[in-house]
Image (tube, rainbow, N blue to C red):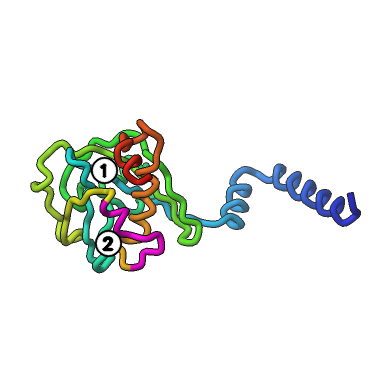
Amino acid sequence: MRARDRMRRGGLRAALTGYRLLPRPLRRVAVRTVTPHFTVGCVLVLSDMDDRVLLLRQRHYGDELTLPGGLLHRRETPLDGIRREVEEEVGILAEVRLPATVVVEPAARRVDVVYAARFLGNPDAVRPDRQEAVEVCWRPAAEVLASASESGDDALVSTATWVVLQQWALAPDGACGTARLAAALR
């Protein structure tokens, strides 16, 4: 080991020892100061009995279609957040349980907790809230994925929505019940 490497390791060891001696509140401040900050959101892939996925056209996304969801409020759990967002955007109460997957977008510094649920009601009865969503539509997930490219060029949906749907479609069998869709994408 070279002398410079030994000095670096010694400096790192001293810094970690000093860190360990700090009171817990100061350690939290130090970690929050030097680590990257990410926003955390929640997204719901809501499919109907015909394996179509609910998509929204929202004012702040222009012509792109998105999945229901949004950013979490302070101290809100992702599960509570997705229930709130779905009720706000389309006025339905969703019975959502475990997350299907998590999508991390380092460039956007965003983490989305993705939930999947089956809509058992009449899909035609789902209406947009009009304050957040201006249109709702049900599209076959395979069609949405096939129409979009990862870059989002000429995409039917936003790039973030495409990434979430692809992660959802390729999730292990049973994670969100998408074996047929995953097989269709192969």
Answer with left or right where residue 148 lies relative to residue 104.
left
Q: Secondary structure at mark 1?
A: helix
Residue occupying the point 31% across, 46% down: 81
Figure check: 118 above or below 144: above
Q: Are marks 1 and 2 in contact (CB under 8 Å)?
A: no
Answer with left or right where residue 19 lies relative to residue 101.
right
x and y percent of residue 118 in the render? 22, 37
Label 1 crowd bin: few (<14), some (14–19), many (20+), radius 10 Å: many
Q: Which residues are magenta?
A: 143-153
Question: Which corner quadrant of the image does residue 155 belong to?
Answer: bottom left
Q: Which mark is residue 156?
A: 2
Question: Which corner quadrant of the image does residue 92 belong to?
Answer: top left
Amino acid at pointer 1: Arg
x and y percent of residue 45 in the render? 28, 45
Amino acid at pointer 2: Leu
Residue 76 visible here: no
Residue placed under numbered mark 1 in the picture = 83
